[in-house]
């Protein structure tokens, strides 16, 4: 067979595949409507929708910093190019003002827009498909009662052929399980409520589950931990590297307040999830989430070893004495120990020993580096505060500190490739001394 013929067969095959996808992917448009009057929605329904919008972090993707609420325009890296979030305010021309409830429901449940085009999975419809009718209705009521913003959608930068929306039909066949959450029998009501929230509106797996090369969450690695925006969203399953198990109480404290005594504080994107999202949910919902994850992470099985882990971590707060001449220890004592120490009489909080934090024990130094670059708290966040050290410490200082704390606060092997990991996370505007 000549090369030409093979080429022709390959191209022909690709065309057939494309046409096939277009064929199975065709979806009708849903007729446009006039924007429904804001007072046609019951206030209680709008309020519920507001809670769900917070828990779903809609604003994190659909609002740009300093821009109007839900006006869209944030570029999200898909691995193939940028996908821009859209305007989801009720402006009829540039937003979703002429979307009926049916059109909105189809977008949330099936990832198809009003005109019938497939939406990209950068929009987490793969999770929102699990929402009940009542919850979708409430979200629709909430968005239809927001101030309309005139903001045309921005064109994505995803190149051909990945920008062919019809091809999303193939992606959906492979990776999308459509359908409302089904309660698991034999599990408690709280567990099922937690699973419903986590797998659906709160889409915890979108950050905490690793993805395959086509951007789909790996089914066989649920909550196994994944990189997110220069951070590590740590494993939430039995592979979680925290020395102390995450008990239901620990998870509840962390999700409710952004801090757990035995684990540390929520920073990076997780701070946003907690303080701008979960904060709007009632206590019972956060207990439900804690119930679900405490069951899935094997914390009960690890409980017998917790006391020993705590004692070991606690003993580690004393390791710096006598090491003052080591460069890492020297830096630590000068820049960190004024806050990160605990007198022996006190129970060893995370702040005291640092040995309980996954930012030290995880395989990836990402969260340690980010915490040093950006600090903790501030920006209206409640709770304790640590300044960012991006301007005060060089990359080499941070590498010395990372290596020293990893060696003295954990039994894990040294982090490899620290210089590159640090350089990649240095904020561009920070002035290096
Ligand atoms: C992780 C980021 C992310 C989150 C969180 C998110 N969205 Fe989106 N959303 C997007 C992106 C990106 C698009 C555009 C997708 C595309 O171009 O195919 C989109 C599209 C949409 C669309 C289709 C609009 C149109 O004009 O075609 C709707 C409706 C929508 N989102 C509603 C929501 C709601 C409601 C929430 C919260 C419950 C939410 N989104 C949360 C990223 C997100
Ligand atoms: C002004 C006080 C202060 C200084 C100085 C300080 N920290 Fe912190 N640090 C905090 C507080 C408060 C927290 C968050 C509370 C907690 O984790 O208990 C924190 C959290 C951390 C965490 C994250 C722990 C977690 O998972 O929550 C790391 C890692 C850390 N600090 C390392 C350092 C290093 C290394 C230095 C020195 C370069 C340093 N800190 C200097 C106050 C400080
Ligand atoms: C937008 C991405 C994102 C979403 C959504 C998200 N997380 Fe996170 N999560 C992170 C990142 C990044 C970290 C690391 C932050 C840090 O160490 O301070 C984190 C940290 C955590 C931790 C601490 C783990 C440890 O051992 O240190 C827990 C627990 C957690 N998340 C639970 C959840 C739950 C439950 C949900 C859903 C309700 C959720 N996350 C949704 C990104 C996310």
Image: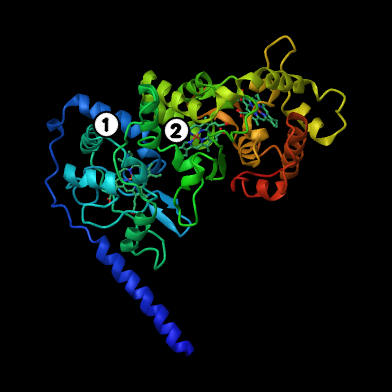
Position of residue 342 in the picture relative to residue 163 (left or right): right
Label 2 Cα neighbours within 10 Å, binned few <14 / some 14-19 / many ≥20: many
Kindly state the secondary structure of the residue where label 1 is placed: helix
Q: Quadrant of residue 413?
A: top right
**Residue 360 rendering spot, x and y as whole percentages:** 67, 33
Q: Which residue is mark 1?
A: 49
Furthest residue in direction top, as rendered: 345
Q: Is residue 91 visible to the viewer in this orientation of the structure?
A: no
Q: Quadrant of residue 280?
A: top left
- Rendered-image quadrant of the C terminus: top right
Q: Residue at x 61, y 38 (%)?
A: 367
**Residue 82 rendering spot, x and y as whole percentages:** 43, 56
- Against 372, is 85 above or below? below
Furthest residue in direction bottom, as rendered: 2
Position of residue 109 in the picture relative to residue 202 (left or right): left
**Residue 320 rendering spot, x and y as whole percentages:** 81, 25
**Residue 137 rendering spot, x and y as whole percentages:** 21, 35
The residue carrying mark 2 has its beta carbon less than 8 Å from ligand 3: yes
Q: Residue at x 55, y 40 (%)?
A: 225
Position of residue 336 in the picture relative to residue 245 (left or right): right
- In this view, the residue in front, 157 or 22, is 22
The residue carrying mark 1 has its beta carbon less than 8 Å from ligand 1: no
- In this view, the residue in front, 122 or 429, is 122
Q: Is residue 356 visible to the viewer in this orientation of the structure?
A: yes
Disc sitting over residue 273 in the figure:
2
Position of residue 115 in the picture relative to residue 16 (left or right): left
Q: Residue at x 75, y 12 (%)?
A: 344
Evaluate if marks 2 and 1 touch, with contact meaning CB atoms under 8 Å apart.
Answer: no
């Amino acid at each position: 067979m000549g090369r030409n013929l093979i080429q022709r067969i390959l191209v022909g095959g690709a065309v057939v595949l494309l046409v096939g996808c277009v064929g199975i992917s065709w979806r009708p448009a849903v007729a446009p409507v006039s924007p429904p009057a804001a007072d046609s929605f019951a206030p209680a329904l709008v309020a519920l929708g507001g809670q769900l919008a917070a828990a779903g972090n809609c604003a994190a993707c659909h609002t740009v910093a300093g821009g109007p609420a839900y006006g869209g325009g944030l570029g999200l890296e898909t691995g193939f190019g940028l996908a821009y979030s859209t305007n989801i305010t009720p402006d009829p021309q540039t937003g979703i003002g002429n979307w009926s409830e049916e059109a909105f429901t189809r977008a949330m449940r099936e990832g198809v827009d009003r005109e019938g085009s497939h939406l990209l999975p950068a929009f987490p419809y793969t999770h929102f498909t699990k929402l009940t009718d009542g919850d979708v209705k409430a979200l629709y009521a909430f968005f239809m009662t927001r101030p309309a913003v005139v903001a045309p959608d921005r064109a994505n930068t995803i190149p051909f052929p990945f920008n062919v929306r019809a091809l999303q039909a193939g992606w959906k066949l492979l990776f999308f399980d459509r359908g409302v959450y089904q309660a698991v029998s034999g599990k408690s009501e709280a567990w099922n409520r937690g699973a419903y929230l986590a797998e659906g509106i709160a889409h915890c797996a979108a950050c905490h589950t690793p993805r395959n090369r086509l951007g789909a969450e790996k089914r066989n690695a649920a909550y196994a931990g994944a990189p997110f925006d220069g951070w590590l969203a740590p494993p939430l399953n039995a592979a979680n590297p925290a020395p102390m198990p995450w008990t239901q109480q620990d998870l509840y404290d962390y999700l409710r307040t952004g801090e757990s005594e035995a684990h540390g504080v929520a920073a990076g994107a997780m701070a946003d999830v907690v303080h701008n999202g979960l904060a709007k949910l009632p206590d019972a919902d956060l207990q439900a989430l804690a119930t679900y994850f405490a069951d899935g992470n094997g914390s009960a099985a690890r409980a017998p070893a917790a006391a020993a882990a705590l004692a070991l971590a606690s003993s580690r707060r004393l390791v710096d004495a006598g090491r003052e001449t080591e460069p890492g220890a020297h830096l630590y004592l000068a820049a960190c120990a004024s806050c990160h120490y605990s007198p022996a009489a006190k129970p060893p909080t995370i702040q005291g020993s640092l040995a309980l934090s996954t930012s030290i024990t995880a395989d990836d130094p990402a969260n340690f580096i980010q915490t040093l670059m950006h600090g903790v708290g501030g920006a209206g966040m409640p709770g304790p505060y640590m300044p960012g050290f991006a301007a005060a410490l060089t990359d080499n200082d941070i590498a010395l500190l990372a290596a020293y704390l990893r060696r003295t606060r954990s039994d894990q092997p040294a982090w490899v490739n620290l210089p590159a990991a640090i350089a990649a996370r240095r904020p561009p505007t920070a002035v290096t001394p």
